[in-house]
Image (cartoon, rainbow, N blue to C red):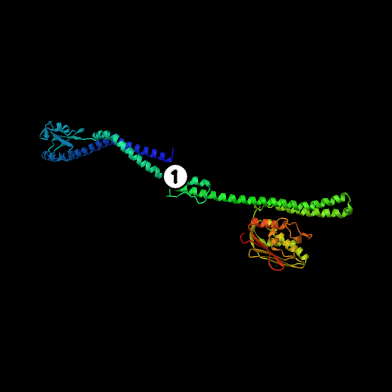
Amino acid sequence: MGIVRKHFLIVTSMMVGTFLLILGFLYFLLPVYYNQTKEQEIKQSYLSIVKELDGQSEADIRTKMIELDKIDPNLYLLLEDEEGEILYPDEPIAATYSQSDNHDQVGIWTNRITSQEGQTFTLQGEYGFQSLFVINRTLLFLFPFVLVLVFLLVSIVALIYSRLSNRRITAISEVTRQMQSLEPGLSCPVEGHDEVAHLAKDINVLYQHLLGNMEELKRENERTQARRKQEADFVRMTSHELKTPIASMLGLIDGMIYNVGDFKNHEKYLKQCREILQEQSHLVQSVLEATTLDIGEQREFEFDLAEAVRKELSPSLHLANLKQLQLDLELEPVIVRANQLFLLKAIKNIVDNAIRYTVEGGRVRIILKDHQLLVENQAEKLLRLEELEQIFQPFYRPDYSRSKKDGGTGIGLYLVQQVLDQHGFTYQFEAVDDSMMRFTIDFSQS
């Protein structure tokens, strides 16, 4: 059963029941209340007459009886002396009083009064009036017609009320059905300040939160897909990086096993095999660091980056001195909120690369101020734009660095990118003039 029909039946039943209770009260209780009230009013009039006549002279009593008898038309007075002789009224009409007026409520009160002369009189008060029981018969006759009329009026009022009271709920229901499509811009109409209005507001807030969560899930799904693609690309590149040295070392070992040509010199080629294994060990270690990097599981806190960088870069600065590089170090106190272990490792990779690829006797500048870190070096060769676009890819190394013995694994800047991206720091790697490369990190959003 719908709410409109339920409200209609409930309101109709309540109003008809209320009307029946009112009719029952009018039929049964009102006449009784009226009769008792009317009788008390007449009795008060009678008692006031008794009080006024008591103690008066006999002449005054006879004179006032005529005036007092007219006070209440429903009260008839009768005065007798001690011998029972009627002194008022002059004609004996008391016996026919109630019958002549067709009164259905009658009664008699009797009191004794004493005159100034000491004579005792009996004062009777007979009352009679028409009760409301006659009206009950009229109500009983009209009851069926009144009931039908009331039922029709109540039904109309209940129907209008039911439809109006459920109009907002119906509108909210229609909007919520539309919300199943999760289309943006939908909202329930909010009218008034009652419970229905609060319900509409709560639905709107819930729907907006749902849309927000759906959008966040969508973005998270896109990020997950991107991470999965990166992981697949990373695994593919790792396999490629391992494939060539493994094949090379297998060739060396086969040559030594079968003593082919110069491979008879086992000591020479065993050293080469060891060098290849050592390089691959460094590569595997870098790969493990890249695959286990998860800053989200580590605790972040605020610390002085200048002091931490000075301690972390101490070995790298000694290396720069050994290479006789011109080192400019300017570190101002800067408070950042980050994972100190990973951030310092990323900065160390940047500085190590700068020192590694600086020309002999060249300059390296490390400047930390105004929430920015600048690492500049006088590079052996400036990177071209297409090389800068690929420099953060795993295992990517410019052609000139591949030929060098200390060309690295190609994982360092990839790790730097992962650390800075997960912290939300902005960064840039660029050539600033004909000889300098600059790596900039902005910590202003930390």
Asked if residue 351 lies left or right of residue 127, the reply is right
Determine whether 164 is above or below 75 in the image: below
Q: Which residue is mark 1?
A: 170
Mark yes or no: residue 340 visible. Answer: no
Count of all numbered marks drawn on residues in the image: 1
Q: Quadrant of the C terminus?
A: bottom right
Q: Quadrant of residue 67?
A: top left
Amino acid type, residue under disc 1 in the picture: Thr
Q: On screen, 127 above or below 256? A: above
Q: x%, y% of residue 340?
A: 67, 57
The image shows residue 266 at horizontal and vertical percentages of 88, 53
**Residue 374: which quarter of the image?**
bottom right
Decide if residue 70 is in sight here.
Answer: yes
Q: In the rendered view of the protein, which quadrant contains the N terminus?
A: top left
**SS class, disc 1:** helix
Does residue 24 appear left or right of residue 296 in this picture?
A: left
Q: Position of residue 51 (x, y in %)?
A: 18, 40
Position of residue 209 relative to residue 101, above or below, is: below
Q: Residue at x 83, y 55 (%)?
A: 272
Residue found 86% across the figure and 54% down from its top: 269
Q: Nearer the viewer, residue 446 or 114?
A: 446
Pick the residue in front: 248 or 345. Answer: 248
